Amino acid sequence: MRYRPKEVNITRLGLIVSKKTAKLAVQRNYMRRVLRELFRLNQHRLPPVDLVVQIQNAFEKPDFMVIQQEFEHLVQQIVTKTSINKSIHS
């Protein structure tokens, strides 16, 4: 996951799911849907950033809880890092 803070008060999401990660379009689209939903549920916690998520390993329905926990952990890290940067620059 990569992010870049923004001045405009909008948080955007970009997803990268390559054919090397999952051969079938159905699998790639499932991963995109899951990540979009997790982003939607956690969007209120995020500061204004451009967020790019690149999938390294394919995941399926049984892995949903693990993916959800990992996404929420990464969101928390972004919130912490951006709040630290704001306090330093203020």
Image (cartoon, helix red, strand yellow):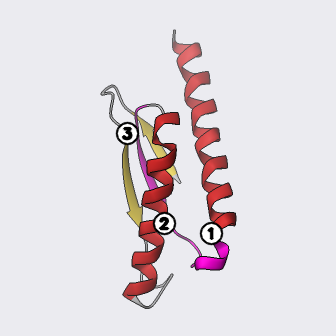
The image position of residue 60, as x and y in percent, is: 58, 80
Mark 2 / mark 1, whichever is N-terminal: 2
Q: Quadrant of residue 14?
A: bottom left
Q: Secondary structure at mark 3?
A: loop
> In the rendered structure, which disc, 2 or 3, sits on the residue that comes first in sequence?
3
In the picture, measured across the screen, residue 65 lies left or right of residue 13, that is right
Residue 27 located left or right of residue 69? left
Circle 1 crowding by C-alpha within 10 Å: few under 14, some 14–19, many from 20: some
Element marked by disc 1? helix
Q: Which amino acid lies under the numbered mark 2 shown in the image of this protein? A: Val
Span colored in magenta: 48-63
The residue at the point 58 percent across, 38 percent down is 78
Q: Work out whether 14 lies above or below 78.
A: below
How far is disc 1 from disc 3 in space, using C-alphas? 23 Å
Q: Residue at x 40, y 32 (%)?
A: 48
What residue appears at the point 48 percent right and 66 percent down from the top-left corner?
34
Look at discs 1 and 3 and give the one toward the viewer.
Answer: 1
Q: Horizontal and vertical percent for residue 28?
A: 43, 79
Please name the residue that numbered disc 2 is placed on: 34
Foreground pick, 3 / 43: 43
Q: Are marks 2 and 1 in contact (CB under 8 Å)?
A: yes
Horizontal relation, residue 77 to residue 40: left or right: right
Residue at numbered disc 1:
64
Residue under label 3: 11
